[in-house]
Amino acid sequence: MKKRILATAVAAAFAGSGVAAAGTLEDELEAIKARLNAVEKQLQDQNEVIRHKDRQIAELTQRTGGGGEGDDGGWFQSVEIGGLLEVEAGYNNPDSGDSSSDVVVATVELFLNAQINDWVAGEVQLLYEEDETDLEVDIATITIADPDGPWFVNGGQQYLPFGTFETHMISDPLTLEIGETRETALMTGIESNGFVGGIYVFNGDLAEDGDDDVDSFGAFAGYSRESGNSNFAVNAGYISNIGDSDVLQDAVNDNLGGDDFDDQVAGVALDALFGMGPFTMIAEYITAVDSFGASELSFDGSGAEPSALNVEAAYSFALVGKDATFAVAYQQTDEAVALDLPEERIAAALSVDIMENTTLSFEWAHDDDYSAADGGSGDNDGDTFTGQLAVEF
């Protein structure tokens, strides 16, 4: 740049002076040198301003977590914020009695995940379900994991790894109604090469003989693998007291009427998922391994050993240029009369991704109640139609 300026200046000087005398030429050269020195000083000042601005931008980028390749980033890069919003319209037509319909905000979930450092992460999730759950802290956990090893430890309020409850339906599977358990627990395990396993302990809300101790526990193991267009997963879980599941706990406490819970009843959960191209199969089974007492959970006048099964088949395809999934399910329970669950359910659902992170779904479900001989009504069957609009952000 300086060479171009010098050439231009010299050319201008000679063009303006014509054929000059020696003294005049020396004067002109001195004037050119002075102008070049002034231009060089101006360029130096401009370069210093540019370097100062670059330093300011770099400092601001580091503080806000921006930056490009090689930038360490800041706190904002380690935080993930998102949520789920589901609005549902439903119509129920029972075999007997009046039909009903409603429009509800079925689910509002807000979550924040923060990677505090290489070893420590935190998760907080809020949940609201109209007519069912007031706004509350649903999940709050701290996890410590070796960044170069397979082990992890976490503690806090969480859904225990007892059942996975995978489904393509709008409604929850009956396995979830029996097995879903949210507790404040301490957990440790390992995760490596598709394998995960561990143990956990917690102080169950359904206290045996009125005890207030950390005397409930569980274990879990699973394996998953993806290869090309296929995927496979299998999981198993054990819990020392299935009575601490959210639904069973309420039913047992209602039946006890304030009396002490006598004995813990263990539970087992098994599930598998297999996908090949557009096809997916899901199977899950959850059961108590022993019977509750008649005063705790009655079935036909005696103690109950509740269980649930869910089997689904799904097919993904393009519908008017949009990703869509059609699924059918068969679900069954046993000795679950006291939980107000149907004995059988068949269901079908269609989901379409109408826009980015926006899904429109429809479901039909038919429930069959337990017979009168098994403690049910025998005629309280019905059909439910549900439409759902869901957005993730």
Image: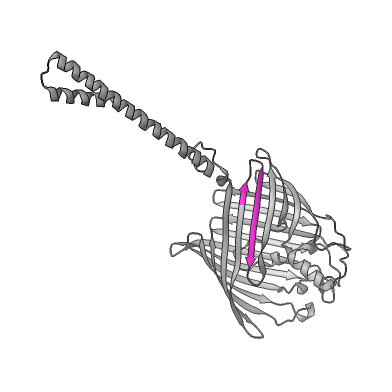
| Residue 20 position (above or below residue 359) | above
Q: Seen in the image, is 2 located left or right of residue 306?
A: left
| Corner quadrant of residue 251 | bottom right
Q: Given the current orientation, which residue lies at the most extreme bottom position?
A: 97
| Residue 1 visible in this rendered orientation of the protein | no
Q: Seen in the image, is 353 located left or right of residue 116?
A: left
Residue appearing at x 81%, y 69% in the figure: 253
Residue appearing at x 39%, y 34% in the figure: 49
Residue appearing at x 23%, y 22% in the figure: 32
Residue 248 location (% of width, % of height): 77, 67
Residue 304 location (% of width, % of height): 82, 70
Q: Seen in the image, is 241 located left or right of residue 34?
A: right
Q: Is 175 or 41 nearer to us in this picture? A: 41
| Residue 48 position (above or below residue 114) | above
Q: Which residues are magenta?
A: 113-131
Residue 325 location (% of width, % of height): 53, 63
Q: Is 232 or 114 nearer to us in this picture? A: 114
The quarter of the image holding the N terminus is: top left
| Residue 47 visible in this rendered orientation of the protein | yes
Q: Residue 117: say if magenta.
A: yes
User: Is most of the magenta stretch helix, strand or loop?
Assistant: strand
| Corner quadrant of residue 145 | top right
